């Protein structure tokens, strides 16, 4: 192998987005093979059409559009989860339940306490929307306080709301599914022109976080605290406040995702909203090439990972895997990714690569 080829290969191996891009390519290849096996168009996975609706409008339709649409909530959650993992070297396993609680609180306000179905909003829509955001943020404050100021291990701290938030949402809705059959509320989960609104909301959230991290020092502070919180504190950073802030941001985005999810089904189904979403968000961060041990993070990788997870889910369903069985396959993927990122495994492959390079140098000599 020439020097130029070797240099190119080393750059490819060190590319931060290598893992998520390779995973996405593998999922697309699997879809192509499945389409060929069933006699369909091999490129049907990439086909996007403009379909006419019953109301006379036109919407984009295709498997890629569906993946971007259905994966929007996980992409939103992945934003907060990435920052949490980076700063605290732990995961927030409560985001799915917080989604449910935020959606329940929003729908209860819009419908009125004790009402299970309504066409008319009891309060302005903006009140319900802000309530969902506020509830998610409040939950983030609770988690952040336990982790940052009480020193509780992140998974243990967030286990409280993982267990309680969904149950509180059920109590808020009086153990009933609250239906909001109102077009303005359903708009968050419907279409804006030809494009699904959840895609637009996810894009706005991603853009805001990207701009904040690029234009401020927040991203550098989060990574610094994640790498070494004690050294960061000595350097003048308030480590506890930064960790607290990441959990607040994570809770806020859980509230946003809960609003989108409830709007999609025009109801607050506390038992099912956000179910297993915490695992998808964690998997998106891991699949994005981010270390679950904290420190440096790659936001773009997490976003690609989130939509890759949705592509995997869509592919599993296409292959005949049931909804109950799909989490098993995702769990296997998590184990593989975490194993690949484990220090002993990385050290083993690094040692082999160094030995191989040394052998080549010795042969040349």
Image (tube, rainbow, N blue to C red):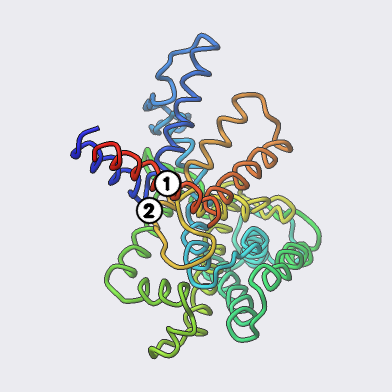
Query: Residue at (40%, 40%) from the top-left corner?
Result: 21
Residue at 42% x, 33% y is: 25
Q: Quadrant of the C terminus?
A: top left
Quadrant (top left/top right/bottom left/bottom right) for the N terminus: top left
x and y, in percent, of residue 183 in the image: 53, 49
Q: Look at the numbered discs 2 and 1 and tell me whether their residues touch, using CB distance below 8 Å.
A: yes
- Looking at the image, residue 175 sits to the left or right of residue 212; the answer is right
Between 251 and 198, the residue placed more toward the observer is 251
In percent of width and height, residue 198 lies at: 46, 49
Front residue of this view, candidates 191 and 2 = 2
Q: CA gap, disc 2 to disc 1? A: 6 Å
- Residue at 38% across / 44% down in the picture? 18
Residue 300 — which label?
A: 2
Q: Quadrant of residue 196?
A: top left
| SS class, disc 2 | helix
Residue 291 in the image: state x and y as whole percent. Answer: 49, 59
In the rendered image, which quarter is residue 163 located in?
bottom right
Viewer-proximal residue, 195 or 100? 100
Could you classify mark 1 by the number of other residues whose Cα lies within 10 Å: few (under 14), some (14-19), or many (20 or more)? many
Vertical placement of 226 versus 334: above or below? below
Circle 2 residues within 10 Å: few <14, some 14–19, many ≥20: some
Residue corresponding to mark 1: 304
């Amino acid at each position: 192998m020439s020097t130029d080829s070797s240099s190119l290969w080393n750059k490819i191996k060190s590319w931060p987005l290598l893992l998520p891009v390779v995973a996405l390519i593998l999922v697309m290849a699997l879809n192509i093979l499945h389409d060929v096996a069933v006699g369909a168009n091999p490129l049907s996975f990439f086909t996007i059409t403009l379909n006419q609706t019953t109301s006379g409008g036109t919407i984009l339709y295709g498997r890629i559009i569906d993946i971007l649409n259905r994966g929007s909530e996980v992409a939103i959650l992945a934003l907060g989860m990435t920052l949490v993992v980076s700063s605290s070297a732990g995961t927030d396993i409560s985001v799915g339940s917080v989604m449910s609680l935020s959606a329940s609180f929003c729908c209860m306000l819009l419908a009125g306490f004790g009402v299970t179905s309504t066409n008319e909003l009891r309060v302005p829509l903006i009140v319900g929307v802000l309530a969902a955001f506020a509830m998610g943020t409040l939950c983030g404050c609770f988690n952040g306080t336990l982790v940052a100021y009480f020193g509780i291990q992140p998974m243990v701290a967030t286990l409280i709301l993982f267990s309680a938030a969904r149950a509180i949402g059920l109590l808020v809705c009086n153990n009933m599914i609250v239906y909001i059959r109102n077009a303005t509320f359903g708009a968050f989960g419907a279409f804006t022109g030809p494009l699904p609104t959840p895609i637009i909301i996810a894009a706005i959230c991603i853009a805001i976080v990207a701009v904040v991290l690029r234009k401020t020092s927040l991203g550098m502070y989060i990574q610094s605290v994640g790498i070494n919180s004690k050294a960061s504190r000595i350097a003048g950073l308030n480590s506890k406040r930064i960790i607290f802030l990441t959990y607040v941001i994570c809770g806020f985005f859980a509230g946003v995702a809960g609003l989108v999810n409830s709007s999609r089904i025009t109801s607050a189904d506390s038992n099912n909203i956000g179910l297993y979403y915490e695992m998808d968000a964690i998997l998106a961060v891991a699949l994005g090439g981010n270390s679950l041990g904290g420190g440096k993070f790659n936001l773009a990788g997490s976003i690609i990972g989130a939509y890759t997870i949705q592509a995997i889910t869509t592919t599993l369903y296409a292959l005949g895997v049931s909804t109950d069985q799909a989490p098993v396959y995702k769990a296997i993927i998590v184990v593989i990714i975490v194993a690949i990122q484990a220090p002993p495994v990385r050290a083993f492959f690094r040692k082999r690569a160094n030995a191989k390079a040394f052998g080549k140098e010795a042969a040349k000599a």
